[in-house]
Amino acid sequence: MRISLVSETWSPDINGVAHTLGQLAGELRRRDHVLQLIRPRPVAAGAPRADAMEAELQVAGIPMPGYPEVRFGLPATRAILRLWRQQRPDVVYLATQGPLGWSAQRVARRLSIPVVGGWHTNFDHYCRDYGLPWLAPLVTRRLRAFHNRCATTLVPTRQQAGDLAARGFENLRVMGRGIDGERFSPTHRDPELRRRWGSDDHRPVALHVGRLAPEKNLPLLRETFLAMLDARPDLTLVVVGDGPGRPALQRALPDAHFTGFIDQQALVRHYASADLFVFPSVSETWGNVVPEAMASGLSVVAFRQAAGAELIDDDINGVSLPMGDEAGFREAAARLCRQPARYARLGRAARSRALQNDWSSVTDDFLGALIHARETLHEATSPCRV
């Protein structure tokens, strides 16, 4: 099957969309599917083209507000039409809903090519996080119009599917996310790294990984880390990631270790070398860092949302708090860091649960949605036979 992937972001971008698409693309190539990629031109001059694509169309783009390293692709109707007339895909997957995605959707409808959409980012939620709550209803209407023109929209959790269905989104299917259990594993624990952090086997390390931006609920991260330090003064704090919220967080937590963005090899060692993972975000569609931490053997403190709702059973394989219970979140994290036997037990169970989600089964779900879209369009366009 020839599959055209349309996305505003791709590796080496560091975000959940790029990560998920990279994993799916690798699985699809191993199964001998032919891939095309349509994306904005990378910011870095001379950036390499994507690996093993039959065709790659790069279009003009503009920086995404709040995410200058990610670009909105501008409409490219003529270029897409030319490509698809020469190399017609069997199905199109629209990973993002910017101007490029709308453009690709129009061309696909014109050529009667089935389209599957992906819900990877809660853009309507971001309106509130960036001080534009009045814009959220308009964004929701536009997103609903976009996705209801797709044969199917893939969402990562049952919770998200229910929420979107209640807001008028149609043809929803759940497709979770996988985890590489060999890459993210406790076997990568690095005693030397812990020593550099000023820790040892008896002093716990609390970790946070993610973009340091308003939508990540950084005030609660700061308050939770401070509460944990009050409860356990010898606790080591490590923050992996970067973004506009880093300076303020660094001033509030002067003794924490801030690494900025790090490469994949270093990231797996940071996960495996910690003991607890604190994730207060409530804006995720999935949150890849949660299963990454769980697979690395960490006890995760998170809200009952996105991957936290799908993967964590409270006090069985992590700590799960009801949405909005910020006081409970702080108290649960502070209590957990004083209970080494408990967070070790939860971490072992967390890895077992995370490993149930592998990329092969996720790719099966993805292909099932693409095949269903093809068959549905074929049935709708086939002439009646009597």
Image: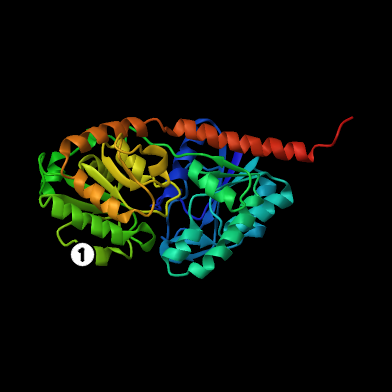
Q: Which residue is mark 1?
A: 252
Q: Is residue 278 left or right of residue 37?
A: left
Residue 369: percent from left, percent from top? 59, 37
Query: Looking at the picture, which amino acid does disc 1 mark?
Result: Ala
- Is residue 194 something one can see in this rendering? yes
Q: Is residue 116 above or below residue 254?
A: above
- For the C terminus, which image quadrant? top right
Location of residue 295 by image quarter: top left
In the image, what residue occupies the spot 16% across and 62% down? Answer: 254
Residue 16: percent from left, percent from top? 42, 49
- For the N terminus, which image quadrant? top right
Residue 162: percent from left, percent from top? 54, 45
In the image, what residue occupies the spot 68% across and 50% down? Answer: 108
In the image, what residue occupies the spot 65% across and 35% down? Answer: 372
Q: Is residue 26 left or right of residue 195?
A: right
Q: Indicate how the structure is coloured in the image.
A: rainbow
Q: Is residue 210 left or right of residue 17?
A: left
Q: Is residue 360 left or right of residue 196?
A: right
In the image, what residue occupies the spot 74% across and 37% down? Answer: 378
